[in-house]
Amino acid sequence: MTTLETPPAYERLVELLREKKILNSCGALLGWDEQTYMPPGGGEHRANQLALLAGLTHERATTPELGDLLEQLKEIEATADPLSVMAVNIRDARRDYERATQLPRKLVEEMTREISLAQQKWVEARRQADFSLFRKSLENIIRLKREEAKILSREGDCLYDALLDEYEPGMKAEQVQALFDPLREGVIQLLQQITDSPVEPKTEILKRSYPTSRQHEIGQAAAAQIGFDFQRGRLDTTAHPFCSDIGPGDVRLTTRYFENFFNSGFFGILHEAGHGIYEQGLNADQFGLAMGDSVSLGIHESQSLLWENFVGRSRPFWTHFFPKVQGLYPESLGDVTLDDFYTAINDVRPSYIRVEADELTYNLHIMLRFELEQKLISGELEAADVPEIWNSRFTEYLGITPENDAQGCLQDIHWSAGLLGYFPTYALGKMYSAQFFKAAQTAIPDLTDQISNGEFRELKTWLNENIHARGKLYQARDLVKVVTGNELSEKPLLEALGAKYGEIYGF
Amino acid sequence: MTTLETPPAYERLVELLREKKILNSCGALLGWDEQTYMPPGGGEHRANQLALLAGLTHERATTPELGDLLEQLKEIEATADPLSVMAVNIRDARRDYERATQLPRKLVEEMTREISLAQQKWVEARRQADFSLFRKSLENIIRLKREEAKILSREGDCLYDALLDEYEPGMKAEQVQALFDPLREGVIQLLQQITDSPVEPKTEILKRSYPTSRQHEIGQAAAAQIGFDFQRGRLDTTAHPFCSDIGPGDVRLTTRYFENFFNSGFFGILHEAGHGIYEQGLNADQFGLAMGDSVSLGIHESQSLLWENFVGRSRPFWTHFFPKVQGLYPESLGDVTLDDFYTAINDVRPSYIRVEADELTYNLHIMLRFELEQKLISGELEAADVPEIWNSRFTEYLGITPENDAQGCLQDIHWSAGLLGYFPTYALGKMYSAQFFKAAQTAIPDLTDQISNGEFRELKTWLNENIHARGKLYQARDLVKVVTGNELSEKPLLEALGAKYGEIYGF
């Protein structure tokens, strides 16, 4: 065997990983269908289908053959250029295999059962706005996640690091905290300046009548225009927006429309289209392998946020799009100026619900959750005390106090689904997106003009080349450094927010 | 172990069969999605997904454990009442196991891949009305089907029998021919009487403007009224109508609408709803087992045809429905009488497209395909020669010649889907449906009045009890005998057609 040949063990590894991914993608389609078109009566059978596919995928993720192959490929991995395709794919396969095989089956099963119960408890607790109904479930989930973290954590890491690593590989809680501290300070300062400003965006504009079929039309057109390829994707309506990657050539977005609130549908589409453009930009030849996969949840979120906020909530974007939206809704927007519309979609105002929060205060929602999660996992905080600390911290950060638990600590599904360590990736995504967008502005000097003209191709190509096509070649922070030339920092985000709100609110 | 206990081997058999069926049902959803909502770019990945699922299903269908269990259950099967649930389920599992273990996995996977590609070729070929674009795919499929038939055929059977047996278990090509011969004679005689009649149905009525959204509305309402449950199913639009059983509680119908031809959408829906009512009437507790499965394609078709033709094209049905349809389309139907409408939807006229053919000449379409398929499989006919023989035979039977391949041999999806041996079941279904409907009329003396009043519950219940709930307890011809008291015959069909057309055309 010459060094130019692909080792048979690697070829077999690729085959196994592809098969696992294809199987997983069948589940993705079933999940998408469950949210979009499945009739009510199909729920029980769908659960059986998904459970079977999950079991088969897990079987493939933990098959001893994978362990044998990785053992055989150890030397190649050690001696190859660490940034070669083969090394990256083997390294990532090893990471996944180790995570999958380290957790005892008993723990995985207990977690699955607990999550299934916790979700029901959470739904009921949220409905009744009563945390006490969910307390016991949260305690159990925290206990199990601590067990999981103990098994997975590496030397020198805190327990939380092991959970964060699942969603943001390589990132440590300490590093996140070091970014969040100055970010919080900057956000709170901006929020104060905005609160002190006499400028009052006319938000009622967005609550006029926007018949939803035309929202769909303009949203789909906008998604296509920024570069989401509808030959290789689609857009549907669901209770909660999401982007589902079915496989190469098939990426599906969903959104929800409210006739009396323009933002949800339109910005939901731009956001999910950002995720979708990332998925469509992955290397299809590397499907199922690290080099054909997204870097992390935070980097994924950076792509959605870049299109939603840095492009979609910018003045140049609306210079191009406002006349079109106005033409679609002459009754609601005929008397509205571009400036009023632009100001309204950038209104900043403390609010209770994370997914409805503005670009600025959203960060505070995330930081609050990150702090609580760390304390829950370290054992400093008991589940029973969550509502109290939530409300007091919320008041401290946002200046308003939730009236009940549904508006407070019960609003998000994540904890009931066992997703701890996930929240910080939303705010990391904000920082990544700001830093990437700044680099794109440098690389494309007339980017602002292009956006004003409704031209997005150069920006999309830049993202494709610098981020999407690289797959998991770099971990998130390294990617940021390679792409932007700088270490990850909160500064580009604070600068961008400061510039935008300074102009709008006059400070 | 007492004889009252369920043998553990049977319990395990049930478990394995259920798992296989669930896996198969994942493929059913992926197939449905491919026809309804999948973006064009998703085709290649979908082929990979379906190939993998087919391989896994085949693995489960051929696992040696199944063979061992069936071996252990041999005595129970031999000594139990042959019409007991356990005996029926074991017997059918053995039949499936034997068929499945005979086919090599490589052949199954090759077929799946070929089919997925062939379907895309067929769509394109039909769009361009150019058989040459599909020829290569058809050759590949015929080659693979011949391989399959050679492996499966039993002593004394022709190759075609082995394929027919997949869709109509127990039926032989020779038996079909023995029914088709007098049927063809009767049909051609009736066609002659109709051609000679001075009565000329006003078919232009049906070609007026019928905006499709209202076709969907009335079609969906009619499907619900005859008993299709939309809590456990749905209705979508596809190039070719079908009914897909995803699993208990999830049965999906599709149809296609033409603004300037009423029949396609409406009768397509009644037809598929008939299939759907059968699926919804199966015993969910027996899901994955013979006792919870449909008898054969012919019996399935009898259910769709019973609702489409014996109910849906009857005078009493339109006594109830015509005012509703007239109300939806006042511009097109305001000046039309019930009698004119009833006569128009029962117009007999040789035409090119099978699914749009009238109830009478439809049989000739099937016989033509049956003859061609037999020759393709026996090797007497090359794929390349299909258009020529199609057109000449078509002219001989129906007196008209297709103008192009889209109107001719490319019109149906079946061959591209590898469904050879399937077509004759349509005409068998006609005969079954006539014989069943005659029995229902005897069992429900005021059935005609009920239909005139838009009441279908008693008929649906009769079908549920006599046919659907029985699963595969009987093979098709035995079921016909048990339900109707008579051997399967072409006579009830010819009698019903003769009575209907005699009244309309005055002979």
Image: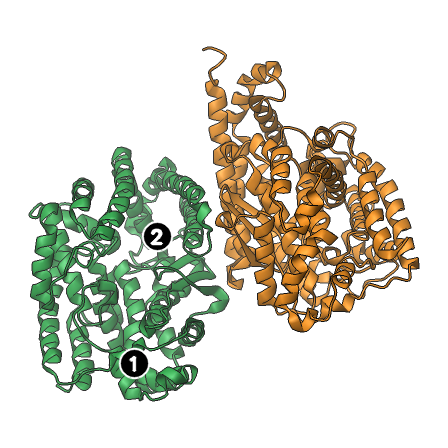
Chain colours: A green, B orange
Residue for badge 2: A89
Measuring from the top left, give residue B112's x and y in whole percent.
Answer: 59, 47
**Which is more N-terminal, label 1 or label 2?**
2
Image height of A46 relative to B79, above or below: below
Alpha carbon distance from label 2 to label 1? 50 Å
Residue closer to the observer: A220 or A344:
A344
Residue for badge 1: A205
Position of residue A467 in the picture relative to residue B84 (left or right): left
Q: In the rendered structure, are the residues bearing label 2 and label 1 in contact, judged by CB atoms less than 8 Å apart?
A: no
At horizontal 56% and vertical 19% (from top left) the residue drawn is B71
**Number of marks present in the image shown:** 2
Dot in front, 2 or 1: 1
Is disc 1 placed on a helix, strand or loop?
Answer: helix
Image height of B250 relative to A311, above or below: above
**Is residue A6 something one can see in this rendering?**
no
Position of residue B270 in the picture relative to residue B53 (left or right): right
Residue closer to the observer: B67 or B319:
B319
Quadrant of res A221: bottom left
Measuring from the top left, give residue B469's x and y in whole percent.
Answer: 59, 33
At horizontal 15% and vertical 65% (from top left) the residue drawn is A364
Residue closer to the observer: A103 or A466:
A103
Image height of A151 relative to B400, above or below: above
The chain that hosts pointer 2 is A
